[in-house]
Amino acid sequence: MPTTIVVTGRHRPHEVMFLALSALLGTAFVAGVKPPTSLEQLVDPWVLWVWYLLLLSSGVIGLASILLPDTYRALVLELAAMHGQTAAPLLYGVALLSTGSGAVVFAVAFCLSWAAASAWRGWQVWTGMRALRQAGDMG
């Protein structure tokens, strides 16, 4: 029986949703919209600003990667976005965890899961880039 391969695209719907949400929330927070105060009060302001800027930059970079027709360059941008999408929730999750408050358990679990999923996607993108380089198809 012959094997059929179905290519559905590089970007999964949940990845695009997180990139769009990151870009929107990062923009809103940098513009001055106040985030929910319950967890915000537990971490230093510099953590919040790094979180906001990582959300904004990685979201915009990831969405830009979707628009590029060149597969290799799109993967380079997507990998850069996944670095930010890993670092942002990891930073925020660890900062919340360091507070010692029991009120942060769900938020920490969510952030660490998000970081792990983004790191996994980054590894997938990196292996895809390596395969393209080995095949000599970088443009």
Image (spheres, rainbow, N blue to C red):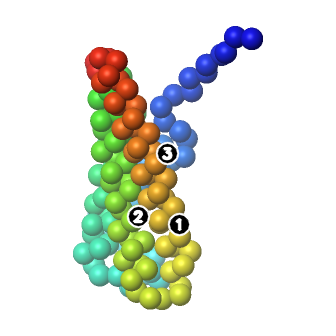
Identity, as a three-letter code, of the amino acid under mark 1: Phe
Q: Is label 1 in a helix, a strand or a loop?
A: helix
Instruction: Please determine whether, in this image, residue 61 is positioned above or below residue 29.
Output: above
Instruction: Residue at 47%, 66% (x, y): give it.
Output: 111
Up the image or down, 20 lies above or below 76; here it is below
Q: Nearer the viewer, residue 88 or 18?
A: 88
Please tell me how crowded label 1 is: few (under 14), some (14-19), or many (20+) other residues with Cα within 10 Å.
some
Residue 136's quadrant in the figure?
top left
Q: Nearer the viewer, residue 127 or 74?
A: 127
Which residue corresponds to mark 1?
110
* Tag of residue 63: none
Residue 92: x and y, percent? 38, 71
x%, y% of residue 121?
45, 45
Q: In whole angstroms, how far apart are the C-alphas of marks 3 and 1?
A: 15 Å
CB-based contact (under 8 Å), mark 2 and mark 1: yes
Give the quadrant of the N terminus: top right
Q: Which mark is residue 15?
A: 3
Please state, as top left, top right, bottom left or bottom right, where the C terminus lies in the image.
top left
Local crowd size for mark 3, using a 10 Å CA cut-off: few (<14), some (14–19), many (≥20): some
Residue of label 2 = 89
